[in-house]
Amino acid sequence: MAEEKGVVLDRAQVKKAVQALQAFLKTKSTSESLFLDDTQQISLLFTLWKIPKVAQTIRIPLPHGQRSDTDEVCLFTRDEPKMTSEQTQRFYKKLLEERGVKNISEIIPYNVLKTEYKPFEAKRRLLGNFDMFLSDDRVRRLLPSHLGKHFYERKKEPLSVNLQSKHLARDIERVIQGTSVKVNNKGCCCMARVAHSGMTADEVTENIEAAVQTVVAKLRMKGPVMKIIHIKSQTSVALPIYSSDLSHLDVQGVAEKNAQTPKKEGKAKKMKTEDVKQTEKKVEEDEEVPQLVPITTPSKKPKLEKPSKKKQLEKAPKPAAGKKGKKSPSKLNKKTSKSDSKVKRKVPKVK
């Protein structure tokens, strides 16, 4: 399937890149990492030709386990009916021992997660104490609201496992030692952890080949998918191990042009016919509308002559100048009214 989509890895080139990366990690190792036996993750960086339309998560089984035996794994289980939290923990511990599962460090029932790990600090401690989280597929949909966003930002969200499976040990081993890729529909890059620095070059090479084949086969995209594939660690630069051939781009470009040319010709014809119709309409309108004869109007209106200020002053009547000997009628009336009042007061009363 990888060959059909145009991805063929050169095994010798991949092995050289892995050896170069391992040599770099040995030179950069510090005294602390030697004492703690700390190993670095080795990841694949995929760059796609197009942004996927739909986001998807791809699980990748690896031929060699990419987790060490010291990794701590936590399992979230459902609450068994008619059992307390302690009885549920004992029940699932016994079940895992009977099925031969030895990689689980701690079992946490759903009710314990809701009550004891409700505070923010408790969730942060839980996140730091374990390297990986698994969950019973019957309670997987209930966990995001109780775990919080930090589990998903650190890419430690729990992976679902069927605890009722007949091959429980094999299924859990595949999930723990395998890996997964989250293909996002908001970008063209995605990353998957495939190995660690403590593995040999051949084991890392085989894991890389298996991961590339699985991702290319399960991607929901048509045509050439992969543009570039890099290998890198947490502290190193990205080393290219695959670069796609650009010959398919010419074929795609010619096909797209051929598909677009008839559409363009059809659009041009439509535009021409629309232009002809518009010109015909304009001609018809010009023929039908008669020419209007302009009416002659006086260029300037006659201005009304305003009377000058001097004429207004001449026409205004002058107030009558009163003589010195004569008094105004208003004053005479006032005096007569006063004299009448005095006369009335001086009239003697008749006994």
Image: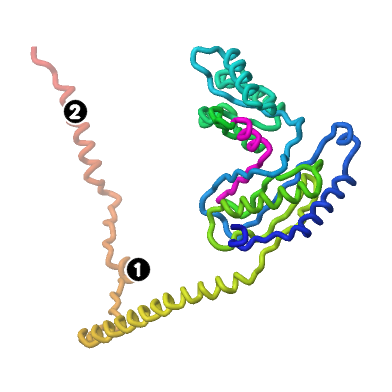
Tag shown at residue 348: none
Residue at coordinates 79% horizontally, 55% vertically from top-left?
A: 15
Front tag of 2 and 1: 1
Does residue 301 show up?
A: yes
Q: Secondary structure at mark 2?
A: helix
Left of 226 or right of it: where is 42?
Answer: right
Q: Is residue 179 magenta?
A: yes
Residue under pointer 2: 341
Q: Which span of residues is magenta-colored?
A: 168-185
Of 37 and 6, nearer the camera is: 6
Tag shown at residue 309: 1
Q: Mark 2 or mark 1: which comes first in sequence?
A: 1
Left of 192 or right of it: where is 266?
Answer: left
State the image coordinates of residue 22 (x, y, percent, origin top left). Answer: 84, 48
State the image coordinates of residue 342 (x, y, percent, origin top left). Answer: 20, 27
Separation of disc 2 and disc 1 at Cα? Answer: 51 Å
Above/below status of 215 relative to 257: above
> Neighbour class for label 2 at 10 Å: few (<14), some, many (≥20)?
few
State the image coordinates of residue 261 (x, y, percent, origin top left). Answer: 46, 78
